[in-house]
Image: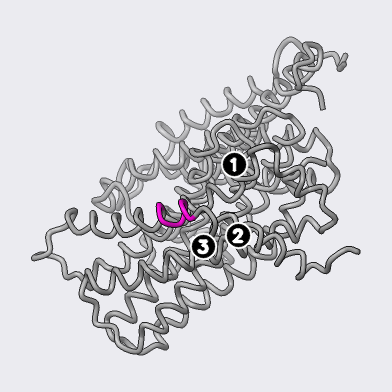
Amino acid sequence: MSSTKRPLFDWLFVVAVLSLIAAYVRAVFFTPIEALQGAAQKIYYVHVSAAISAYLALGIVALMSIVYLWLHDERADRLAESAGEVGLLFLTVVLTTGPLWGKPIWGAWWTWDARLTLTLFLWFLTAGYLVLRGAVDDAAMRSRYSAVLGVLAALLIPFIHLSVYLFNTLHPMPILLKPSKPSMPSDMLITFFSMWGACTLLCISLIGARYRYGVDRDALRALEGNGGDR
Amino acid sequence: MRPTLLAATWLVARKDLKIEFRTRTAFFAVLVFAILGVAIFYFAWDSTAVAAVDLAPGVLWVIFIFSGLLSLQRSFGVEQADRAMDGLLLSPIDREAIFLGKALANLVFVAGILLVTIPAVVLLYNLPLGRTLVILFAIALLAAVGLVAVGTLFSAMAANTRLAELLLPMLSLPFFVPVVYGAAQATSALLAGRPTAEAWPFLKLLIAFDLVFLFACTLAFPFTLEE
């Protein structure tokens, strides 16, 4: 039984939401409008920040899957589960904001471009991962199955990337995460970094909240003795 | 006396194939499904607007993965009855051999389906294939190995879940993307009469996929069994 004392208030979550609101206010009202793309460019701040948070969460899933298969530690499994759910949330944000930007700028909601396809299949894989978790009754078996899937999915990603790499890409090239200096005015850069920080905070606080829920749920199942004990 | 990995693999594969040979129901059901699928596709497209040659690779490889899923479904499904899986686990063989044997039996099954489906597509869609038919069979073999490697593992996992029939396609289909892509693009290059060298990058993709996932799934399989 866990008897850890927890604060009544999830301060990290509150800070995350407040900084997200601040970043939105800055992005909408205090950041110059881009000359060529107009207001649509502002989606960039949310889109890229959410994408980085999604990769962070899914990276945790893959890493924790390996750790679970290696050490059989239930905490790794619970962390993978939490990060999987939060990852799906951020991937959904990426896949919604992308087409909203694509329609006015590309003239199409969707193209079968390398990055778009990869993100879509990450969404499918994460959704499949969560459905698998829900479909196995035995707790130890659920942990092993989902860890196996997490590792295999990480192996699959280079192949999907390779498959679509041969197509021409329409997606804008990285503006920040590239070897040369970021090609963005400092006003926009600050907005981007504040949004990025806010998204990362939100991602971490959501994973944390989901993890604590998992601890409570497993403790409750152990008390009820309906196979939830590990 | 503990049989070697290869001998044990062969034993498991032979057991599965013997069950299949004696009943024969699943093979014919999947075969009819595959040819039916090829025929149904004919009604789903305007033959005056799109040439059959352009459509055939897509039809062939989509039908291939769906009939593959049907055959994989029963791979571990048959072990559920009377808890036959426990007997398999109790036998003095490596767990990797159980996986490889199952995968080998599935490969024979899927190859048998393809052996009939490919000529059916060639005939029904009037494909201009002469000696390149041999290369098409080579592509088919590479695609079948990839499908079976991933599919056998997921079949073992899905058989133990509440959503078995639903979960196998949901888990496997994203993994079949590189298989379908590589096989379909290589087939298109062949059908368009382009030099075989143009199909080579796609064949390399298939070979890499086969090697990586055959290895990874064999290692992962023991984790899916009860300890």
Q: What's the image's color scheme?
A: one colour
Q: Is residue B186 left or right of residue A150?
A: left
Q: Find numbered disc 1 in the image and state the secondary structure of the residue it sits on.
A: helix
Mark 3 to mark 1 CA distance (whole Å): 19 Å
> Range of the magenta residues?
B24-29
Q: Amino acid at mark 3?
A: Phe
Q: Picture coordinates of residue B186 (x, y %)?
A: 39, 76
Q: Nearer the viewer, residue A198 or B60?
A: B60
Q: Residue at x 76, y 22 (%)?
A: A228
Q: Residue at x 78, y 40 (%)?
A: B226
Mark 3 to mark 2 CA distance (whole Å): 12 Å
Q: Amino acid at mark 1?
A: Ala
The mark nearer the N terminus, 3 or 2, is: 2
- Is label 3 in contact with label 2 (beta carbons under 8 Å)? no
Q: Amino acid at mark 2?
A: Lys
Query: The residue marked by circle 3 belongs to what chain?
Result: B
Q: Find numbered disc 3 in the image and state the secondary structure of the residue it sits on.
A: helix
The mark nearer the N terminus, 3 or 1, is: 3
Q: Residue furthest front?
A: B22
Instruction: Rate crowding at label 2 as few (under 14), some (14 to 19) or many (20 or more) other CA atoms within 10 Å.
Output: few
**Which residue carries the number 1 mark?**
B158
Q: Nearer the viewer, residue B47 or B181?
A: B47
Q: Quadrant of the N terminus of chain B?
A: bottom right
**Which residue carries the number 3 mark?**
B109
Q: Residue at x 53, y 61 (%)?
A: B147
Q: Nearer the viewer, mark 1 or mark 2?
A: 2
Q: Is residue A44 left or right of residue B86?
A: left
Query: Magenta segment: does it hold A2?
Result: no
